[in-house]
């Protein structure tokens, strides 16, 4: 059952080669055996086995799958509301807290037949990228236990990579779906803002937040996106020779970037062998400038998080109350204090939105001038950081700030080492214009078909 795909699973169910209860039991056993080392799971659904039995009974009685995600065990980031489990956002200030309702995307998953198997760890309140929380502590990368799994959706990333579930959900305000996808040899899709509803998700920045799928292959991520999307995604067909723009300003030029650049050189060669035409993009967009001077995430945090906490009658209904309680990981204190000093009605906030509009126009011009279907670049210019360090040189802010879609794909692995038996995963993004999700998925599937990079991690290191 390792590395199972949704389509292979459904075929096995229909051919009576396995049951949903078999798969759920398999994943629960792996969580029990291996998550001590990874710390990726906050809460296992106590009803998971019964839900699996219900799926099996339905199939036995009707001879048909109940939906496109029939019996699919899904790993859900724990800032997404579930009626039958607490939603903690990784914070002791929300320990045991439940709104008693399912988020919109959870209702859609359940309607398609999915089982919410477990809630996963995250960087507390999704505030940063190393996946450490006061509820669960530090999640570790299953490929290299000395490294973080990226973040903030690193619990979903690590758990999926470790085969603790069949598909997963993350949320993304700056990097947070694509960072753990890159760091864990996964596929992650950040959809156009508004394609997936934010109803029932603990917010960071409603301007930039979106949920999206994470999976071990493109087809599975696409299947989940089809279910959770609230908007119809336009169909598309690929031209005979798709053009991909290489955004060179997002490639590092320091010694620390050498390993990622080596893998990206192979990716560019492979894109050419797949039938893509790679063209150099001359624009010098700088990712640090976007994060420092355009992104509004920290400006939104106070108003949007406080508004949510008040609306759900949370035990600590504001950043002030959380800070006073002491029930949070000290690593997020500086960001909470800073966000508490910023406001969405400030002149600087308005200036940042103006810069965002200019950035969108600049990106649209790049696509037209280069006749490109997508832009390609490494998600992170250097390897995912080690435990105790902070992420650096991540490129996810381009999609987050513009609200445009992006898909992260495995680029390969670094050289093996004592701590990383098959190497450290590296990922790259295909970034597109609004509403181009199906186009990006088609491009990604074409590349994945010819150059599959997915490899499971080595379990021996977890024992």
Image (cartoon, grey):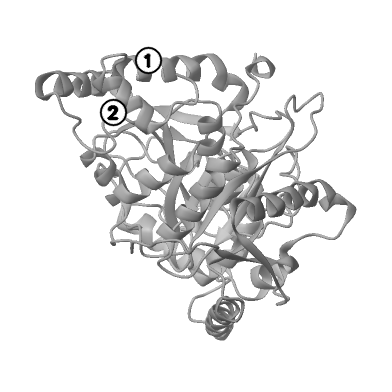
Q: Quadrant of residue 162?
A: top right
Quarter of the C terminus within the rendering? top right
Residue ID at (52%, 75%): 343
Residue ID at (60%, 33%): 137
Q: Nearer the viewer, residue 164 or 103?
A: 164
Q: Residue furthest right?
A: 255
Counting other residues with Cα less than 10 Å from the Cα at mark 1, is it few (<14), some (14-19), or many (20 or more)? some
Classify mark 1: helix, strand or loop: helix
Q: Is residue 343 left or right of residue 255?
A: left
Q: Residue furthest front?
A: 240
Q: Which mark is residue 254?
A: none
Q: Position of residue 339 (x, y in %)?
A: 57, 65
Q: Is residue 206 left or right of residue 173?
A: left
Q: Is residue 306 left or right of residue 159?
A: left
Classify mark 2: helix, strand or loop: loop
Q: Position of residue 170 (x, y in %)?
A: 46, 46
Q: Which residue is mark 1?
A: 25
Quarter of the N terminus within the rendering? top left
Q: Nearer the viewer, residue 254 or 347?
A: 254
Q: Position of residue 136 (x, y in %)?
A: 55, 32
Q: Is residue 179 left or right of residue 207?
A: right
Counting other residues with Cα less than 10 Å from the Cα at mark 2, is it few (<14), some (14-19), or many (20 or more)? many
> Which mark is nearer the camera, 1 or 2?
2
For the question of whether residue 437 can be seen, the reply is yes
Q: Quadrant of residue 157?
A: top right
Q: Residue furthest left?
A: 61
Q: Which residue is mark 2?
A: 71
Q: Nearer the viewer, residue 3 or 450?
A: 450
Residue ID at (60%, 59%): 276
């Amino acid at each position: 059952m390792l590395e199972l795909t949704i389509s292979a699973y459904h075929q096995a169910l229909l051919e009576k080669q396995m049951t949903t209860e078999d798969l759920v039991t398999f994943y629960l056993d792996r969580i029990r055996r291996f998550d001590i080392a990874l710390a990726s799971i906050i809460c296992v659904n106590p009803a998971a086995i019964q839900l699996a039995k219900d799926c099996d009974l339905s199939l036995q009685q009707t001879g048909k799958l109940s939906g496109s995600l029939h019996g699919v065990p899904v790993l859900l980031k724990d800032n997404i509301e579930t009626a039958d489990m607490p939603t903690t956002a990784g914070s002791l200030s929300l320990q045991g807290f439940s709104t008693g309702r399912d988020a919109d995307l959870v209702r859609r998953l359940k309607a398609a037949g999915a089982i919410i198997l477990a809630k996963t760890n995250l960087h507390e309140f999704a505030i940063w990228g190393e996946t450490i929380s006061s509820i669960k502590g530090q999640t570790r990368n299953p490929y290299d236990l000395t490294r973080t799994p990226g973040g903030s959706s690193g619990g979903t990333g690590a758990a999926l990579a470790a085969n603790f579930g069949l598909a997963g959900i993350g949320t993304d305000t700056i990097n947070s779906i694509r960072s753990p996808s890159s760091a864990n040899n996964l596929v992650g899709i950040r959809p156009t803002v508004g394609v997936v509803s934010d109803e029932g998700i603990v917010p960071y920045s409603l301007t930039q937040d979106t949920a999206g799928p994470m999976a071990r292959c493109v087809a599975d991520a696409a299947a989940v996106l089809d279910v959770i999307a609230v908007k119809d995604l336009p169909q598309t067909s690929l031209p005979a020779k798709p053009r991909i723009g290489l955004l060179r300003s997002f490639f590092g030029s320091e010694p620390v970037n050498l390993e990622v650049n080596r893998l990206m050189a192979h990716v560019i060669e492979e894109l050419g062998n797949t039938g893509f035409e790679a063209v150099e993009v001359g624009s010098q967009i700088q990712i640090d400038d976007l994060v420092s001077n355009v992104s509004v995430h920290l400006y939104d945090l106070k108003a949007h998080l406080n508004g949510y906490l008040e609306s759900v009658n949370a035990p600590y209904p504001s950043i002030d109350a959380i800070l006073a309680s002491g029930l949070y990981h000290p690593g997020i204190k500086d960001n909470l204090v800073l966000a508490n000093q910023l406001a969405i009605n400030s002149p600087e906030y308005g200036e940042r939105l103006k810069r965002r509009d200019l950035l969108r126009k600049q990106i649209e011009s790049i696509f037209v001038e280069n006749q490109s279907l997508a832009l390609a670049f490494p998600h992170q210019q250097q390897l995912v950081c080690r435990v105790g360090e902070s992420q650096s040189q991540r490129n996810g802010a381009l999609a987050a700030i513009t609200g445009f879609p992006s898909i992260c794909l495995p680029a390969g692995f670094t050289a093996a080492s004592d701590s990383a038996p098959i190497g450290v995963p590296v990922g790259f993004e295909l970034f597109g214009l609004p509403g181009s999700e199906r186009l990006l998925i088609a491009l990604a599937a074409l590349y994945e078909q010819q150059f599959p990079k997915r490899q499971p991690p080595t379990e021996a290191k977890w024992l």
